[in-house]
Image (cartoon, rainbow, N blue to C red):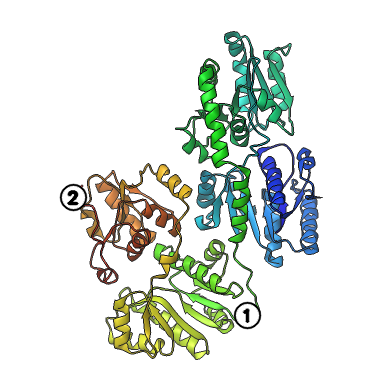
Amino acid sequence: MNILFATSRLSLGGAETHIVGLTEELTAMGHTVTVASAGGKLTASLPDGVRHVPLPLDRKDPLSVLRSLLGLRRLLKSEPFSVVHAHARIPAFLCGLLQKTMRFPFVTTAHLDFPRKRWGLFSQWGDRTLAVSQDIKDHLIREYGLSPDTIAVTVNGIDTAHFSPLPHEGGLHLLHVSRLDADRSLTAFSLIAIAGDLRRRFPDFRLTILGEGGDLPAVREAARRMDPHGAFLSVPGGVADPAPYLKEANLFVGVSRAALEAMACGLPVILSGNQGYGGILTPEALPVMAATNLCCRGCPLPTEQGLLRDVTELLSDRLRRDTLGTFGRETILRAYPFSRTAEDCLSLYDSLPPRPSEKRGGVLLCGYFGYGNTGDEAILSASLAALRREDASRPVTVLAAKPRRVARHHGVRAVGRFDPLGVWRELHRCKTLLFGGGGLLQDDTSLRSLLYYTALLRLGRALGKEVVLRAGGVGPLTRPISRRMVRNALHGAAVTVRDRASKRLLTELGPEGGVTVVPDTALSLPPADRDRVAHLLRRYGLTAGKFAVLALREESSLLLPLPRDLTPVLIPFFPREDRAICLAFQRRLPRAVLMEGLSPSEILGVIGEAAAVLGMRLHALIFAERMGVPYRAVGDNPKLTGYPKSDALPSAKAG
């Protein structure tokens, strides 16, 4: 692959070190990498064969932004890049602008949790986004409305050959590495404040602080006041390679990538930064801390008393230091090799939506999309994946209630389903009108929706389009006029349905052509990855196999009998209708847990860890079947009564 990295600068810092290491790994794997940035100390660390293009991508003044925009445009026109990968806000914004006309594959990496109120209007996240921790993924979903399915999570990979342990003899040496800006220097000042006490307790104690930034002069002055002769306090400033210092230390205090490098060198770590204090990093604390990329977001702020206590504890106990150091090194070797970061990037590049040919007749995909109904959104995701597998060059347009959101979430063209001119234009452009699945052809909710869908089908046929109903649900049709409308609309269409009841009804109506039963489209949806599911369970305080998922939609569900030994987990499959019912249930049973805002793949993954599913929504049962989890339909909804029942549910005693 020919890859372009765009970042603000290559000065000293965790994100910049991540980028340099990633270029090394990707070039070693045979890929070509170009880096565009404003330069910095780490530019010299780029491996041989990596071209650096200097652009003022770290500056916000209009002239510099224009120079960067034109420079990136020239670079992108000069050679065919397989993918453009932005690592900072300004480069991502400019690449996002250029992508609208140049149509290159585009991804971003989120290294920090940028506040939306400051950066929302200028944020571009590309076709896919890579987050360096689970909580940054949560932040992107919550603050920027990104789809969970477009965000992958990677790790800050470490070069375990370069960062490796060395036998250390020669006193007690504490090392702190961090940017020393106003928003990152709290721990440096706190360590200096307690350094005198530590020196008195441990006569061979030394403290070294590495880093550069706006607060470096103030940190040096604080160190001079504490230790005028420099006997035990040293502030060298920023260094391109902290490995020699790490190999001389006994203990590390800091966060994020610097903490990971210290672990790779076999050092025990105390997590402390401006975003929180995690304390001594132990095997028990690692899963929670790893979810924030070891940045301690959400933890209490560090205090001098807490630092003094934990540093004293570890400096007093060599055996514990050695044990924690071995644990840290093994953790990096297992979970944080740079090869994993590179592989995560390449997997993300491979998942990018293809650039369809505008010259080919495309597909107009119709369904109940854009309303937030989990089942229908699962059908949309699975349908798009299937269409891309069948023919990636074929353009696809989706009719949706919220076309901008659908386009952003799925990387696909979308138009408003109630935009008459837009629908007419897309019907003329397409070759195939595809009804992607779901219970669209029914008059149980209203006759209006049936009129809409049958009108589309008849209009598509009148325009000479190929008309397909794929894995649809048909019925109930309680009115004679409804039955005539469906029979006429499906005349000449290619029809498959998702259940035998729909086949029986269509056989009675007698539309031309055979009807085949196929699995519901949502059954092909993959679940979220195991790390993501484990993070969600931790976030809600759940244990795999110790909870039951409830998909409610009616007031009668408030009397639902439940196993006493299982935690009820309420998931509103259609939030605008189900959320109030879930809240009422939770008020009656406070031990119930409400999980909101999950994508279909995340819900699928959570259901995969449940002991059982009780569902008043069809796709709750479909998801349970997909994941091999016992389930039971609740209620007399026509879509549920004919669905196969699972007999392996735990006994449901009132709880």
Q: Residue at x 60, y 62 (%)?
A: 352
Regarding mark 1 in the picture, which secondary structure is present there?
Answer: loop
314 over 525 or under it: above or below:
above
> How far separated are the C-alphas under marks 2 and 1?
58 Å
Q: First in sequence: mark 2 or mark 1?
A: 1
Q: Residue at x 44, y 49 (%)?
A: 533
Amino acid at dot 2 = Lys
Q: Nearer the viewer, residue 29 or 593?
A: 29
Task: Point out residue 37 in the picture as x, y percentages from the top left corner.
Answer: 76, 48
Q: Nearer the viewer, residue 451 or 71?
A: 71
The answer to whether residue 475 shows anywhere in this view is no
180 over 631 or under it: above or below:
above
Q: Is residue 582 left or right of residue 401?
A: left
Task: Point out residue 594 in the picture as x, y percentages from the top left corner.
Answer: 35, 49
293 over 576 or under it: above or below:
above
The residue indicated by pointer 2 is: 653
Regarding mark 2 in the picture, which secondary structure is present there?
Answer: loop
Amino acid at dot 1 = Arg
